[in-house]
Amino acid sequence: MTQTTPVRPSGRAGAAVVPVLAFAGIVVAVMQTLLVPVVKDLPRLLDTAPADATWVLTSTLLSGAVATPIMGRLGDLFGKRRMLVASLAVMVVGALVSAFTSDLLVMIAGRTLQGFAMGAIPLGIGLMRDMLPRERLGSAMALMSSSIGVGGGLALPAAALVAQHTDWHTLYLGAAGLGVLAIALTLAVVPESPLRAEGSFDLPGALGLTAGLVLFLLPVSKGSDWGWTSGTTLGLFGAAAVVLLLWGLMELRVAAPLVDLRTTARREVLLTNLASIMVGVSFFVVSLVLPQLLQLPAGTGHGLGQSMVVAGLCVAPLGLTMMFTAPVYARLSSRYGPKTTLIIGLLVIAAGYGGGLGLMSAAWQTVVTSVVLGAGIGLAYSSLPALIVGAVPASETGAANGLNTLMRSIGTSVSSAVIGMVLANTSDMVGGVAVPTLHGFRVSFGIATAAVAVGLVLALFLPGRRPSEHPQLRASSEEEANLERAREALRGFRGRVLDATGAPVARARVTLIDRHGRRAGATVSATDGTYALAVPAQGPYVLAVRAPGHGPLASPATHTGAGGGVDVDLPGPRPTFTGGGPGAAGAASGAAPRSPPGTPLPRPRRHYGSMAPWRLL
């Protein structure tokens, strides 16, 4: 398992960071919702059979599921902002490919590229954890987590309006434009996180997970076409089970796995991910049922006879309410913790679906249902990243949130398959056309309620709130946040790794060794050479640094724990130490720090040869 010492957010992130990252999440959601208004017309638009046209949607689902954990891990290793921009760039390319074709295979290729944008949401959450002060982190992560619902709710009426009055390819041009804008804003406003995980990218693990997910999600999405008991469907499910089992065994033996299964198996992480599947199921049911109910002709006896645009406007409050619950979540989580907030959200969802069973006879009733469900889903979605981030090391934030987002995607995929099967099996034939029935809609709401009940049971078994652990994951007052940052500043070494010319040395490995010769922490310097290492206790340490093209170097340093962090400088044969605060060890201008009397220090090793000299500042 890779390890690194967390770098606490410095608070330097500007006020625009949160809305820019949330906008990137909304753009991703817009891409996912893009084709909803024209789904039923895809066979005609692409001149293909209905079964083949569904690959336009399935391809995006598969690529998004695969890309989410992989991009999260790449973000941990090489920079979350860098991978966020890369995800959006691939989405833009895919949107442009789809905008200029009506060929089925080319359209599927473009939609596959668009699915890579799904990795932007866990990467955004990881950036927020790395940069934001604690008083802003709770509501920021809530907004980012809910952005996929916000974007979907807002995009549905807009996409319907565009599809009704212009060529449907314009939808892709709009998505590409939004993607370019998100990239530009990200590069201009969002700084790169200095936090890096150690190790290398687990390519065999990525290939194994990709194969397992494709083998599992393919029959989930196509089972209704192939038949749930067909040999193809059952064979793919069996192959998925075998591949994922072998992948798991392989990951347990890898030093730097794509997904740390030991961390994933912790009770808090495991139960949160399982609850995420249930929340994903409940979220997608309303997105499938209400638009159909609103657009069915009134002559069916239960349809509300609304246009595509009106139907989108009635469902839009779902996303808007999710967005407005972010500050509510921050207050609830601050007082009661994310576990309790998740439970409250699930109870609100259950109330929304329960009440929705009797609110299907008028358009305004669907608006009420959307608002209630949006509030519950917003609270539940906002709680999930806080629970995950609070249970994993900082170096695994991207990968862990990527896996959690994948769990939600699996929930929506299962929901789509199950509800589609229910509506098909309960439909009536009217004029040779299968029409969903009111009974089918109510059964779908009942399935969503059952999924929420399972999620509620899982949430009840989550560990209780521990006030002393991970305080950054709960919104708090500014005074409490400042006090906590002041306490953490009392311990730690920080500075920059520079070469002899003063240029920063990126990805230099800085290791902290205690008085017994054991590793007490490690990190990797950022692109600008900055590093930070927390100190587990006061006393003497050795800082050892390695970087490609440079000789290894080490020097002793003592931290008293009574003042600010210690900045360490290793410019040459005689190290210079400058105290970062009144209680920091060390003196100025080259004087080596003194250890407490009777405390032995490991002897520093120095290497000078043909390799480039460097220093730690």
Image: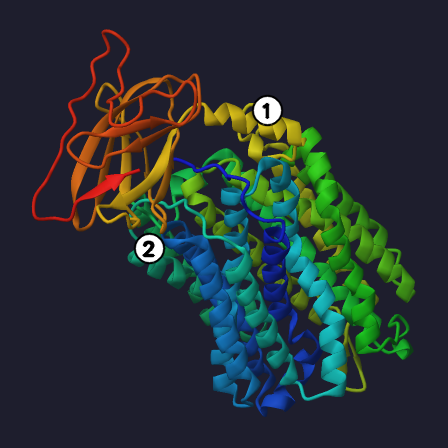
- Left/right placement of residue 159 relative to residue 365 reads left
Is 149 above or below relative to 164?
above
Q: Return the residue found at the far left.
A: 609
Q: Position of residue 360 (x, y in %)?
A: 87, 62
Q: Looking at the image, which is closer to me, 230 or 208? A: 208
Q: Return the residue found at the far top.
A: 598
Q: Give the numbered dot on residue 392.
A: none
The kind of secondary structure element at disc 1 is loop
Is 521 above or below relative to 67?
above
Residue 481 occupies quadrant: top right
Q: Position of residue 336 (x, y in %)?
A: 69, 30
Q: How many marks?
A: 2
Between circles 2 and 1, the one closer to the viewer is: 1
Is 465 above or below relative to 548?
above
**In what quadrant of the picture does the N terminus appear?**
top left
Determine if residue 411 is in view.
no
Q: Return the residue found at the far front.
A: 589
Q: Residue at x 62, y 34 (%)?
A: 474
Is 435 above or below relative to 15?
below
Q: Residue at x 63, y 42 (%)?
A: 383
Determine if residue 47 is in view.
yes
Q: Position of residue 286 (x, y in %)?
A: 74, 60
- Left/right placement of residue 521 relative to residue 303 reads left
**In what quadrant of the picture does the C terminus appear?**
top left
Check disc 1 and report the residue beneath it: 467
The kind of secondary structure element at disc 2 is helix
Disc 1 marks a residue whose amino acid type is Pro
Q: Looking at the image, which is closer to me, 214 or 143? A: 143
Q: Looking at the image, which is closer to me, 528 or 320? A: 528
Check disc 2 and report the residue beneath it: 205
Residue 369 occupies quadrant: bottom right
